Image: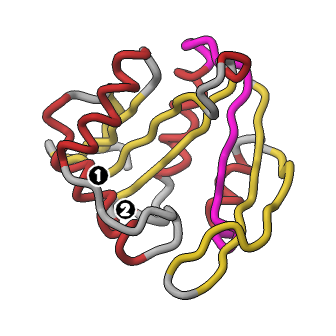
Amino acid sequence: MSDIILRPFEWRDVPEITAIYRPYVTDTVITFEYDPPSEAVMAGRFGTMVDLGHPIIVAERDGAVVGYAYASFYRTRVAYRFTCENSIYLRQDMIGQGLGGRLLDKLIEESRACGFKQMIAVITAERANSVRLHEKAGFIHVGTQEATGFKFDRWIGVTYMQKAL
């Protein structure tokens, strides 16, 4: 893992970020999106975070994007402005190698510097590995919503975890 560098997002990353995200949409319940977003849609999403100055971190190995993480507003109402929600996505061949933890640690650091005071993780309830990842980073379980999402012909719950920054 020492050959992986963590760096800020650049616009040239959009195609690889889009490709990394696609199988999470089409093959998993990690996201409740049904249709994979296009590069233009992803560029719009990331553009909003860039405009807000929110942290976006890219993991790169040998010039290729192998993962990314970002934090942005948990909710858009002004009272939530100091609370962010995190997201981490890894290229499929990078899962289980410790990269998620590295990205999360860096994201926490950059979110603090950005002025966020709380970080929320919204995790599909059946994703024990994501729960463990966040527990290792000091997140606490703050609640579960049962059967909130419906994907692949089944109901799926959501676990909420939180960390004071």
Relative to 21, residue 127 above or below = below
The residue at 51%/45% (across/down) is: 87
As shown in the figure, which amino acid type bears the numbered disc 2?
Met
Identify the secondary structure beneath mark 1.
strand
Q: Which mark is residue 92?
A: none
The residue at 35%/74% (across/down) is: 26
The residue at 65%/51% (across/down) is: 122
The image shows residue 10 at horizontal and vertical percentages of: 22, 28
Magenta stretch: includes residue 116:
yes
Q: Quadrant of residue 158?
A: bottom right
For this orientation, the residue located farthest to the bottom is 153
The image shows residue 92 at horizontal and vertical percentages of: 34, 67
As shown in the figure, which amino acid type bears the numbered disc 1?
Val
Relative to 78, residue 143 above or below = below
Separation of disc 2 and disc 1 at Cα? 7 Å
The image shows residue 126 at horizontal and vertical percentages of: 67, 74
Q: Which residue is mark 2?
A: 94
The image shows residue 112 at horizontal and vertical percentages of: 62, 18
Q: Nearer the viewer, residue 43 or 165?
A: 43
Quadrant position of the C terminus in the picture: top right
Per the rendered image, the range of residues in magenta is 112-128
Mark 2 packing: few (<14 Cα in 10 Å), some, or many (20+)?
some
Q: Earlier in the sequence, mark 2 or mark 1?
A: 1
Disc 2 to disc 1: CB gap under 8 Å = yes
Q: How is the image coloured?
A: secondary structure
Relative to 135, residue 32 above or below = below
In this image, 129 relative to 55: left or right? right
Q: Which residue is mark 1?
A: 66
For this orientation, the residue located farthest to the front is 77
Q: Quadrant of residue 139?
A: top right
